[in-house]
Image (cartoon, rainbow, N blue to C red):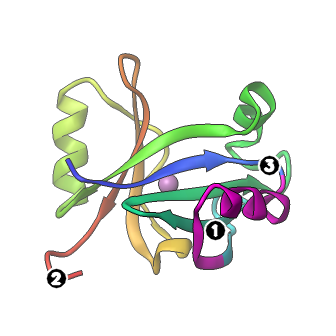
Amino acid sequence: MKIHHIGYLVKDIEKSVPSFEELGYRIETDKVYDPLRDVDIVFMINGGYRIELVSPKSGKSPVYATLKKLGSGPYHICYICDDIDEQAEKMRENGYIPAGETAPAVAMSGKKVCFMFRRQVGLIELVEYEADD
Ligand code: NI
């Protein structure tokens, strides 16, 4: 499956952006607040690599505990699919466990995303892209 981005947890997105710019990333999309997950999100690009900086706004965020435990760092890889329901179902049959509902991602212009977990792989994200997107 094609990779869309690598999700990267950071404590303070404003402070992290210049550090990633030093590493050769440029901002792709300005900061967006996602109320569903209570996180700020900025997408950055470095050549063929896209990262999603994710910063929890409070302890209510589902990624707050992960950041506390692991500190800043990559925590999911997002894969592109053309039918998210079909793909998620296929992965459930292969032993993946859905982590939450499929929902539109405000930071990705409302594209449908879902998270899946499998012990041998860890956390992954699926995003649905039409063929002409
Ligand atoms: Ni993501």
N-terminal label among 1 and 3: 1
Q: Residue at x 20, y 43 (%)?
A: 89
Q: Nearer the viewer, residue 23 or 92?
A: 23
Q: Which residue is mark 3?
A: 60
Q: Which residue is mark 1?
A: 42
Labels 1, 3: front one: 1
Labels 3, 2: front one: 2
Secondary structure type for disc 1: strand
N-terminal label among 3 and 2: 3
Question: Would residue 25 be counted in the magenta stretch?
Answer: yes
Q: Which residues are magenta?
A: 12-30
Dot 2 surroundings within 10 Å: few (below 14), some, or many (20 or more)? few
Name the quadrant containing residue 32.
bottom right
Q: Is residue 82 above or below residue 118?
A: below
Q: Nearer the viewer, residue 130 or 77?
A: 77
In percent of width and height, residue 93 lies at 18, 30
Q: Residue at x 40, y 18 (%)?
A: 119
Q: Residue at x 23, y 53 (%)?
A: 2
Q: What's under tag 1, amino acid-wise?
A: Val
State how far apart marks 3 and 2 are (Cα): 36 Å
Q: From the viewer's perspective, is 94 left or right of 127?
A: left
Q: Is the residue marked 1 within 8 Å of ligand 1, measured from its CB?
A: no
Q: Is the residue marked 3 within 8 Å of ligand 1, measured from its CB?
A: no
Q: Is residue 8 above or below residue 47?
A: above
Secondary structure type for disc 3: loop
In percent of width and height, residue 117 lies at 41, 31
Q: Which residue is mark 2?
A: 132
Name the quadrant containing residue 75.
top right
Q: From the viewer's perspective, is 52 left or right of 32?
A: left
Q: Is residue 76 above or below residue 6?
A: above
